[in-house]
Image: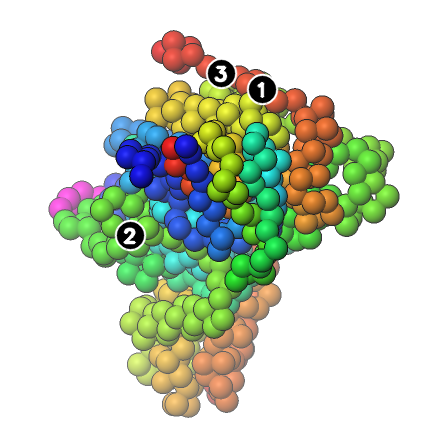
Amino acid sequence: MARIEIKQSLCKGCALCTTLCPEGLIEIGKRLNESGYFFAVFREEGTCKGCALCAKICPDVAIEVWK
Amino acid sequence: MQAAEKKVFERPRTLKEVPFHFCPGCHHGIAHRMVAEAIDKFQLRERTIGVASVGCSVFLYDYFDVDVIEAPHGRAAAVATGVKRARNDRIVFSYQGDGDLASIGIAETIHTANRGENITIIFINNTVYGMTGGQLAPTTLLGQKTSTSPYGRDFMQDGYPIRMTEILATLEGTAFAARVAFTTPKNINMAKKAIEKAFQFQKEELGFTFVEVLSACPTNWGLSPVDSMKRVENEMIPYFPLGIFKERKAADVL
Amino acid sequence: MTEKQDLVKGNEAVAMGALDAGCRHYFGYPITPQSDIPEYLSYHLPKLGGEFVQAESEVAAINMLLGAAATGVRAMTSSSSPGISLMQEGLSYIAGSEIPIVIINMSRSGPGLGGIAPSQGDYFQAVKGGGHGDYHLLVLAPNSVQELYDLTILAFELAEKYRNPVMILGDAMIGQMKEPLLRRTPEKIVEYPKDWALTGAKGRPQRVLKSLYLKDGELTAHNWKLHQKYEAMKKDEIRYEEVFVEDAELILVAFGSAARISRTSVMMAREQGMKVGLFRPITLFPFPEPRLADFAKKDVGFFVVELNTGQMVEDVKIATAGRSVDFFGKPPGALPTPEEIFEKIREIYPG
């Protein structure tokens, strides 16, 4: 099982990652980070395949991928 | 407990662990990451000198862990020429926006390419002047409203959007010229490969290398990051086609 | 050290001085009356393993210079008035980024396209900053072929010492004339530490050369730092030549080619028993203000001769506040003759 880690403090909530995840495992959360952005959150319970598309599209290099 | 979990995607070494100042959804960050990855891939960090230009891209030195010199508006290609001529065993790249490269700096850009300077230019085309607040750029699309083309770009008034990659591809000194975008997984991969190839060509001293990145400026376009990505795909790519427009073979320069 | 003298053109003496100072990187664009400099260097630099680039414009040339010098090599450009105007943007960035470069202005006449005759109409542009922002070039004003050579070598040292652009301000006359030159190649090139040079961040932290300072107080501090350098130049780098000034009742002040012509006029006055001296600033920035102020403590008059309608005279007035300062200016067209200047001396000479 793969997983991703979203660095909350770097995320600006642009939501580009949410459009590319083939499994629909990322969404913009309801909490604000210290910069005042609603940041993206990863649904741990899903079936992440580690394709890293989310990380590749992330303009803030806020996502790391583990496999 | 899983045994051998491996990190398969992480921040490149050359990119400092600091947040970008770019607006949400701005593509500068993706382009920055790809440039840093190319530098890492060929282990060039310790012999790379970057040239920062004027615009949103000026803070290059805050993000890239390499030596950097800041150029006046439009002059990055000339500055890069000077750096390379003085230190021809170093890797030299500039990173410039469309106002900088295609308007005020077009003379420096064209002549640097024409001399075949062995440098790499990463060119961010987002069809507006970003840092000054979204004014008309040489790349602004016909009909596009900006803060200085409030009625939309009209070719009778402002001419046509300029295609830099095509222009530079006609020059003998250009070794590699490509236009890329980040709109689809396929295009993202192509962009990464093109930027890598530009640095590889420089490493192999094949001549001038140029990658134009079609980029979104959600803030000045007044669109969400997701809609901005759609605009790149649906409006920019039809006018600015993606692809490799020039790729010199090593044998060509022998 | 060679003792052989050759008959050399002023512009070529500059090029020779640059080579003998260890400069191996030149970026320029042709313009009369200084094209002998790029012509000479385009021949010699490749043979010495150097780089000669004829840029697409003066704008590009000064920025190539910015890039090359940022890596710590000795680099220069040369041009003449209209071309120097185009370089002002780059000079401002170079001064702001504290990069040592040498720039030669074999000035011609303006404004605009003007002409190619000798002129000193670029004095203000050279010494008061020239580009935007609060900065100075260090400006050297030679008046002979030998001095063109010697001061070019010195220019490279001073540029590195202060991490500041240094300008040689000549003109069409001294650039084009031929005189004997003793090419006294320095036995040791004086160099300064380059712990700022961009060479690639190998085994050390990243280095950045820039002029943008946006954080609170940064730009204020940067401007004061630059100011301190200019103050240090004023303290340590003032250079001038004096002829018959000890007993002078009238001191003629002139630089460069105006000083050359004026020297003959001063000799003519001395032959007539008039106590006239010549004071020739060699550094125009820093201006030899303290020395002139010393003279002004005595009962002497000052007479400024320039190849323009009055520029350096303002600095002489500031330096000699309270003393009478006469002025004779000759805008571009025809050079003044020694007799013409001598007549003016006779008109204003005390008593």
Circle 2: is it few (<14), some (14-19), or many (20+) Cα within 10 Å?
few
- Whole-percent x, y for residue B33 in the image: 46, 39
- Whole-percent x, y for residue C125 in the image: 53, 61
C159 horizontally vs B109: left or right:
left
- Observer-nearest of B187 and C271: B187
In the picture, the disc for residue B243 is 1
Reading the image, the residue beneath label 2 is C205
Q: Which residues are magenta?
A: C1-5
Chain holding disc 3: B
A52 horizontally vs C143: left or right:
right
Reading the image, the residue beneath label 3 is B247
Magenta stretch contains residue C4: yes
Whether C348 is drawn above or below C84: the answer is: below
Q: Secondary structure at mark 3?
A: strand
| Tags 2 and 3 touching, CB below 8 Å | no
Q: CA distance from mark 3 to mark 1?
A: 11 Å
- Whole-percent x, y for residue B28 in the image: 55, 42
